[in-house]
Image (spheres, rainbow, N blue to C red):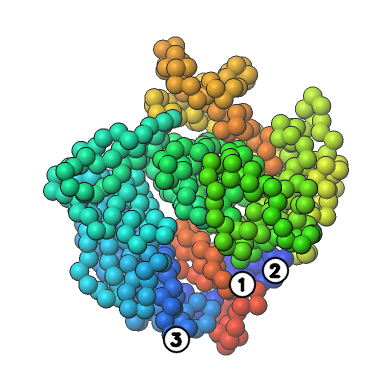
Amino acid sequence: MAAEGGGKEMNEIKTQFTTREGVYKLLTHSEYSRPNRVPFNSQGSNPVKVSFVNVNDQSGNGDRICFNVGRELYFYIYKGVRKAADLSKPIDKRIYKGTQPTCHDFNHLTATAESVALLVGFSAGQVQLIDPIKKETSKLFNEERLIDKSRVTCVKWVPGSESLFLVSHASGNMYLYNVEHTCGTTAPHYQLLKQGENYSVHTCKSKSTRNPLLKWTVGEGALNEFAFSPDGKFLACVSQDGFLRVFNFDAVELHGTMKSYFGGLLCVCWSPDGKYIVAGGEDDLVTVWSFLDCRVIARGHGHKSWVSVVAFDHYTTSVEESDPMEFSGSDEDFQDQIHFGRDRANSTQSRLSKRNSTDSRPVSVTYRFGSVGQDTQLCLWDLTEDILFPHLPLSRTRTHTNVMNASSPPAGATIITNTSSNTTNGNNSGANTPGINSLSATLPRSNSLPHSAGSGGGISSGIMDSAIATGVSKFATLSLHDRKERHHEKDHKRNHSMGHISSKSSDKLNLLTKTKTDPAKTLGTLLCPRMEDVPLLEPLICKKIAHERLTVLIFLEDCLVTACQEGFICTWARPGKVGLLSSQNQASSPSGTVV
């Protein structure tokens, strides 16, 4: 982790930070909040969320921002790095009684300078469709709360659709709606469409078409967030039971699952090419999961509390080619694996799609993603080719001192990223071949934690102890709050096969003999590898940037946007994108700590 000194410096709010691209600077005059700029007393209120849309108006300033603070919802012109925010003139402002906005999403397909379709989810379960430009009468879904009475946790338009949207609730249910249909005056009746391991999908049974079109029941406890893949074909869901579940959305089939180290998963996002998913949650980790291999390929440790948002930076993710661009056979293999062809028109996606080939591998691959958490810290992470293309089998890969205890230590450490610890050098992640790195304390690294027993091993054992203490494996047939005594080693060996984990009959048999969940059922399996069995990433930067817990991280072309629970939405200019605004106002802004 990046050292930040001690004492006062540890608690100092950073206003700029440096990566290998250069310096990111907080633009204090581009801060959005309630018009009075007074910090919001956030006790008991729902997280502040931010949505963006571009309305393509002729002025060249088509960005619009929507954010909720407490009972209020605001809609502004977003001026970003170009001009200071003018909070005195919101395009639209709404104050709700009896319920609070919890999440929102614009339809980018239908947005124009004259009209935008904005969905807003609420704490009492309703979903409202509004047009903050036209301010015309809106539509309200689940108005009588006959469909679901629990809080809306996430709402999103279905990609490529002008009328379909998906809503998840704290009940663990998701509903597919069509804006053209009514919700009916009675509670819906459902008919089973499909069910599988810990999920079921029902259709709405009625004479005339009504909402919801589909009801998904996923896992145990709240469904905290979902995200569509870049091509819109797959859906990743994270739940309070600690599971990531990835579905083929159209076929309504489960593609793969992953289990958190412990606790619930709170957030999820896809890489720009749809090949990796990152999830974060109550284990304070970010977990990288391969869509193709359906397995955890890395974990990142940098946060000191729950991770609330993860997001990929599409603008810093890069591929440097060694050969002229050509399509390798790996894309076809990929399509075979997921049983249908995918149309990859996007240039970033097609460039990245070559990455699976080992014969003509790119010189360097870097996925950049970020995370923010309740510890008020922003972390940036690089996922590089030594993580993506390990030469050794996963079972032989180790990251810290536990490698010394392995019966046959690997020939080399396949998981060290070779940028220096301050990450100010160029991107040389392809320079060292993973198979020939020797495991020495002097190895340069920025994305792996130190190998000393005092740090890496301590983190591993500490997390493992709390995982065992809290009971990590939650299946639909088992109680969410059960605890398990600590005898995981024997059970780990006995229960190692995936067949045992996924077979319903063995779960039922176990229930007859055991009433408590067994952490070892997932720990040490493909669902949830042990800490020493996957690479452990260290953040490129890890900075305290707010006084209150962070709830938003969005990467835009010339800036990144963060928000905290006090209701302040901050714009961080990318290197070289500061422009006139910063030079004019830098003198009056608080001095930033250069790191």
User: How many residues crowd around disc 3 within 10 Å: few (fewer than 14), some, or many (20 or more)?
Assistant: few
Instruction: Using residue 539 as the reference point, say whether residue 169 is left or right of it.
Output: left
Residue drawn at point x = 64 percent, y = 64 percent: 316
Residue labelled with disc 3: 59
Label tally: 3
**Percent position of residue 31, x then y:** 47, 74
Query: Depth-wise, is mark 1 or mark 3 nearer the camera?
Result: 3
Q: Is mark 1 on a helix, strand or loop?
A: loop
Is 117 left or right of 547, judged from the image as shown? left
Q: How far apart in space, not on screen, are marks 1 and 3 (Cα)?
A: 23 Å
| Disc 2 residue type (three-letter) | Glu
Please state if 8 lies on the left or on the right of 240 as rendered. Answer: right
Front in this rendered view, residue 3 or 528: 528
In the rendered image, which residue does mark 1 sit on? 574
Are the residues at dot 2 and dot 1 in contact (C-beta closer than 8 Å)?
yes
Would you identify the image quadrant in which residue 133 lies?
A: bottom left
Q: Earlier in the sequence, mark 1 or mark 3?
A: 3
Label pair 1/3, CB-CB below 8 angstroms: no
Residue 415 sits in quarter: top right
Q: Distance between the residues labelled 2 and 3?
A: 30 Å
Q: Which amino acid does label 3 sit on?
A: Ser
Which amino acid, mark 1?
Arg
Q: Position of residue 572 (x, y in %)?
A: 56, 71
The kind of secondary structure element at disc 2 is loop
Query: Between residues 63 and 457, which one lies in front from this camera angle?
Result: 63
Query: Seen from this angle, which residue lies furthest top?
Result: 513
